[in-house]
Image (cartoon, rainbow, N blue to C red):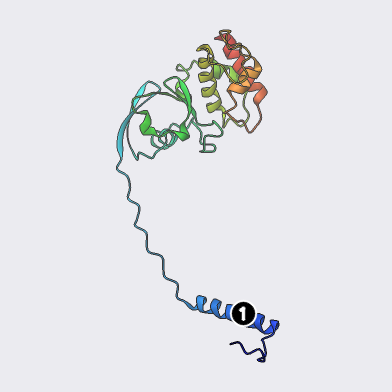
Amino acid sequence: MEDLDSPRPSRRALLQAGAAASLLWVGVGRAQPQSAPAPSAPARPLPSQAITLRINANDQLLDLDPRTTLLDALRHQLGMTGSKKGCDHGQCGACTVLVNGRRINACLSLAVMHDGDEITTIEGLANGDLLHPMQAAFIARDAFQCGYCTPGQICSAVGMLQEVRAGWPSHVTDDLQTQPVALSDAEIRERMSGNLCRCAAYPNIVAAIRDAAEEA
């Protein structure tokens, strides 16, 4: 039975004892030796893969790490630096090229995915010394400043006009029944929204695309 006459510990004594026990536990924990992490196995390189990229009507034979993006294959393996690496996350559009007539972000696509595809870069749009109408329109309208985004802007615009001719609507198309789609400034801005210009030359870019569309 509990001895009711024995003195009980005070609240202060209980708190002091608890604090002392906590400090002792922390000290014991810190004194324990820390085990070194197990060394990780070195990464093994993936076997290379032979592919044929048909770029600007010319076959290019490459032996690539399968993780190589199309953009890096163009720039580093083939020396075709017209396609720019801006964000490397598919957000700026500076790396836009045409694959089988459709525009894509080359930084988001693996080169091995395009074995045998028809790839057109900014270097392949002109016919010798004769500029593509979109290139000529960009020059006439002064639709660039630093020029870094311009190759992607032009390739994207060429692909966009093909989409318009095919009757593809956009988010701002008012009438889905009327063909062909009326290419207003709002349509151009919406359809080119994936291509960013840090110099903000957008009014001239829209004007250049409108000129090229009217000429076509």
Residue 28, compared with residue 213, is above or below; it is below
Q: Quadrant of residue 35?
A: bottom left
> Where is residue 68 shown, x and y percent of the image?
39, 38
Q: Quadrant of residue 169?
A: top right
> Where is residue 173 shown, x and y percent of the image?
61, 16
Q: Is residue 89 left or right of residue 188?
A: left
Instruction: Work out which quarter of the rendered image holds the N terminus and state it.
Output: bottom right
Who's the residue at 55% across and 20% down the image? 157
Q: Is residue 178 left or right of residue 110?
A: right
Who's the residue at 65% across and 17% down the image? 185
Residue 16, compared with residue 46, is above or below; it is below
Q: Which residue is mark 1?
A: 18
Res 141 visible: no
> Where is residue 10 shown, x and y percent of the image?
69, 85
Callout 1: 10 Å neighbours few (<14), some, many (20+)?
Answer: few
Who's the residue at 36% across and 33% down the image? 112
Q: Nearer the viewer, residue 92 or 4?
A: 4
Q: Is residue 40 left or right of residue 189?
A: left
Q: What is the number of callouts on the image?
A: 1
The residue at the far front in this view is: 1
Check disc 1 and report its element: helix, strand or loop. helix
Q: Quadrant of residue 80?
A: top left
> Where is residue 171 shown, x and y percent of the image?
60, 21
Who's the residue at 31% across and 31% down the image? 51
Residue 36, compared with residue 162, is above or below; it is below
Q: Nearer the viewer, residue 34 or 126?
A: 34
Instruction: Work out which quarter of the rendered image holds the C terminus and state it.
Output: top right
Res 190 visible: yes
**Amino acid type shown at disc 1:** Gly
